[in-house]
Image (cartoon, rainbow, N blue to C red):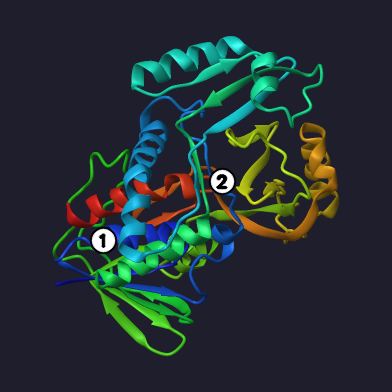
Amino acid sequence: MVRVAIIGCGIVGASIAFELSHCPELKVTVLDKQPPAQASTGAALGVLMGVISHKTKGRNWHFRETSLQRYETLIPELEAVTGRKIPVNKQGILMLCLEGEDLTKWEKLKATRSSQGWKLEIWDVEQVRDRNPHLALNDNIIAAIYSPDDRQVDPTVLTLALVDAAKINGVDFEFGVEVTCLMGGQDPQPKTNSISGGKGILPILENAAKCQIQTSSSKLEFDRLIIAAGLGSSALSASLNQLVDIRPVLGQALHLRSPNPLENPDFAPVITCDDVHIVPLGNQEYWVGATVEFPLNGEEIVQNSEMLDEVMARAIVLCPGLAKATIIRQWSGLRPRPEKRPAPIIDRLSSNSNILIASGHYRNGVLLAPATAQTIREMILQ
């Protein structure tokens, strides 16, 4: 039995745990100082922008396509196993295009997606108005892109379902356990291996060093270790003298309740325009977000209320009915963004090939979690 530890139980860590729970040769333990679905996962809107993304090849597209395909089977699978109802919007994403937008690039993307087996539609303003009478389409809106195959899912409920299902399959979860540092020797012949879509993976060295974890209460040893701790991944890797530079980008969002139904009852996609998302939740409730706030001069980020006010104002311009909505809740979270390298980081640590990192997904943690989990499984079992 191969002992595997996962540090972190956001959407990525929980997805990896569930994926590995199907491998009888693995004994999986998940450690997190917080309950599941905290930090960036608990703050995410869960908008899965895959088909509508301009990523069309290589790892970026492979991960998006793999995840979208997996979600179609994963959500019903989790619901059947756990009995949880996972809120998912299957009515797609409608992206409004502002004046100056080059629609020819969307025509090219539409053709590319068609060749890949996915659908995109380019709507004129009248089509948008006909299907979405609640939107105010001023002269700045020239068209819209409709992506029926993209989705939106509740990240917190999804993560809790992944945890429940993994538990049923034998995974151990230890919450309230803080990992203070990692320890372990080096491989006899250290190797560096960056993966690309699950290809070109080096085999795990059988004589590689074991993975030791120092927690606030004890020292633990495992055969394989996966760091999926979001922003906490940098400090953990640093304890092994490995630099994994992941920095925070703050996002704020709102949960609103409207006194009246707004959208067409038969058509309620996620509406997005100029990086503002309006996410219908049903029962006249909506999520609106999110800000993108970077640290200044490497300092700690302090959330800017004016930026959230601006997001809300832009949402009201798109959907005037939101002006009468009541704010139920507002929240913020820190997204883990890799510095000077593409997101996400899915790699082996160069000093110990049995320590993997799956972190730094930035704004696409929910979208890329299934593909990340499948890739980690391949790396563990290779």
| Total numbered labels | 2
- Asked if residue 245 can be seen in this view, the reply is yes
Which residue is found at the position 43% from the left and 13% from the top? 111
Residue 219 location in percent, x, y? Answer: 35, 85
Which residue is found at the position 32% from the left and 38% from the top? 196
The amino acid type found where label 1 is placed reads Leu
Residue count near mark 1 (Cα–Cα under 10 Å), binned few <14, some 14–19, many ≥20: many
Identify the residue position indicated by label 2 in the image.
Answer: 363
The amino acid type found where label 2 is placed reads Arg
Vertical arrangement, residue 367 with respect to residue 12, above or below: above
Identify the residue position indicated by label 1 in the image.
Answer: 20
Is residue 261 or residue 272 the one in the foreground?
A: 261
Residue 29 location in percent, x, y? Answer: 31, 74
Quadrant in the rendering for residue 59: top left
Vertical arrangement, residue 32 with respect to residue 53, above or below: below
Quadrant in the rendering for residue 149: top left
The N terminus: image quadrant: bottom left
Which residue is found at the position 54% from the left and 54% from the top? 246
Is residue 221 or residue 323 the one in the foreground?
A: 323
Q: In terms of secondary structure, where does tag 2 sit?
A: loop
Residue 2 location in percent, x, y? Answer: 17, 70
Q: CA–CA distance between discs 1 and 2?
A: 24 Å
Is residue 231 or residue 325 the one in the foreground?
A: 325
Task: Identify the disc placed on residue 331.
Answer: none
Q: Earlier in the sequence, mark 1 or mark 2?
A: 1
> Position of 127 compared to 139: left or right?
left
- Asked if residue 350 can be seen in this view, the reply is no
Residue 211 location in percent, x, y? Answer: 29, 72
Vertical arrangement, residue 51 with respect to residue 381, above or below: above
